[in-house]
Amino acid sequence: MGGQLLLFAASLAGVIFLVLVSRWLGLGRGATIASEAEARELADNALCGFVPTDIGLAPGGRGALLRDSRGRIMLLAPHGARFAARLLDANACVTRDGTRLTVTISDRTFPATTMDLGPDAEAWERRITAPEG
Amino acid sequence: MPNFDPVNYAVPAFILLVLAEMIWARWRHPQAYEPRDTAVSLAFGLGSTVAGALTASLVLAMLVKLHEYRLFDIGWQWWAWPLCFVLDDLAYYWSHRFGHRIRWFWASHVNHHSSQHYNLSTALRQTWTGFIAISFVFRLPLALIGFHPAMILFCGGLNLIYQFWIHTEAIGRMPRWFEAVMNTPSHHRVHHATNPLYLDRNYAGTFILWDKLFGTYQPELDELRIRYGIVKQLGSFHLLWSVFHEWIGIAHDMWAAPWRHKLSYLLREPGWSHDGSRETSDAIRARWLESQASPPDRP
C-alpha cells in the first residue's frame, strides 16, 4: 500500500512537471484556419459530405461558420490547438455586437464561440436565427 | 502468487520519453502538444492506475479460479512466455475490436481516442471504467488453457508498454520488414484517425498481423492528411466529462428510446440510432467511398 502511494505521488509529480514543461515550451498555441480550403476540409472531416456554399472565416482563422446547399450551418470552434465542429440545430442561439457574433449551441459542454465576421456578421446572424432549407 | 507489474517500472521511462518528444515538438511540430490536452491525457493515465489497483484483485481472482479448471498444465516452461505473449496479443486484438464495435465497450475505450492530438501522452490516456466494460474477459480463456495468471498479467503489462512508443508523429515509417509484422507509429496513427477511410482499422496491439489476418488492416497513405480524435470531437477539456461522456450518452439514449430499442443503444455499434438520425463508422466510410467515386462539384 505504501509503495503504491509512493508510486502515485511520484506519477502525480511527473504529470505536473510535464504539463508545466509543455506550457513553458509554448506548445500548441492557438488554432488557426489558414484558408477557406482548409475550412472546407475541416468541415468535410467533421461531417463527411458536408460541402459548404457559404463560408464565414473569422480574422486570423480563429473560427468559421459554414452553410451548405441544404441550409445546414456548421460551427468550427477553436479547441486548444485544434478545431471542433458542431451542426447548429433549432436550439442554437446567436447574439451580435456590431460585427462580432457569439454562437451558443444546445450542447452545454461545448463553449460559446465569439468571432468577428466583419460586414457579413448580420447575414450570418439572419441565417442562424431564420435558417432556410 | 507472484505478481509483478512491469508497467510500474516503465513509468520513469514514459515520463522521460514524453519530455523528449515535447522538446522535439518545440522545434519541429509545436502543434503536436497542447498543455490542457496533455493535462487531461496524463490525468486519465494517473486515474487509470487507481481504477486498475481497485479492480486488479478481482480480475486476478477470476484468473486464478479459471486456472483451477485448466485444460493443460503449462507451468513456467520457457516457451510458455512467448506463446502467452502472442496469445494475449490475439486476445487484445479481439478485445480492442469489440471495444470499437459495441457501444458498451466503446464507452470505456473512447477515452483513449478523445484527444485530437497524437503524441506519447495520448498513449497514457487510459480509461477509468475498463472494469465496467468487462475488457478483462478476453484474457480469461488464457487461464483456462493453462497459462499461469501471473504470466498472463505480466504479458499484458508488456503489451501495454510496447504500445506506448507507437503513439507518436515523430517517427515516420520503420524498416519494411518491421512494418510488415509489428504494430508501428504509422499503423497506429491510422487507428487514431477520424478520416473516413481510417475509421475502425488497425486494432493490433503488438502484431499488425492480426489485422491482416482478420481483414481490418489499412496502411497509412502519404497523400491523406490525418485528423485525430473521435467522429464528434469533445470540444471540452473538462476531465470528468471526458471520462464519462459516452456513459452519460448511453444512459440518455436508453432513457429516451422506445422499449424495444433500449438495449440496442448499449449493445450495437457506436453511432447506431433507431431512427437513422446518426451514422456508424461503416456508414461514414461507405458515403466517403461513394463520394470519392463521384466527387461533388465545388461551388
Image (tube, rainbow, N blue to C red):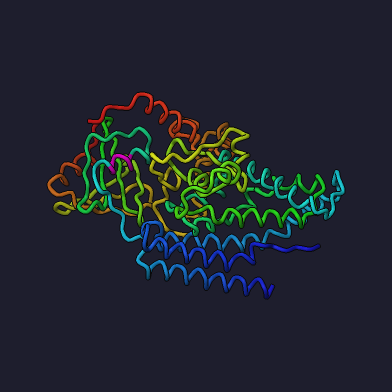
Q: Residue furthest left?
A: A119
Q: Is residue B154 above or below residue A7?
A: above
Q: Position of residue B212 (x, y in %)?
A: 59, 36
Bounds of the magenta segment: A38-43
Residue B69 vs residue B14: left or right?
right
Looking at the image, which residue is at 53% across and 33% down?
B258
Q: Position of residue B75 (x, y in %)?
A: 85, 53
Q: Position of residue B278 (x, y in %)?
A: 44, 35
Count how many numbered circles sit on residues in the image.
Answer: 0
A132 vs B77, nearest the viewer: B77
Can I make out residue A41 in this image? Answer: yes
Residue B253 among magenta residues: no
Q: Is residue B288 above or below residue A59?
A: above
Can I make out residue B247 in this image? Answer: no
B286 vs B277, nearest the viewer: B286
**In the picture, which quadrant includes the N terminus of chain B?**
bottom right
Looking at the image, which residue is at 39% across and 40% down?
B224
Looking at the image, which residue is at 40% across and 56% down?
B32
* Quarter of the view holding residue A122: top left
Q: Main secondary structure of the magenta part?
A: helix
**In the picture, which quadrant includes the C terminus of chain B?**
top left
Q: Residue furthest top?
A: B294
B151 vs B59, nearest the viewer: B151
B78 vs B163, nearest the viewer: B78
Q: Position of residue B67 (x, y in %)?
A: 82, 50
Residue A42 among magenta residues: yes
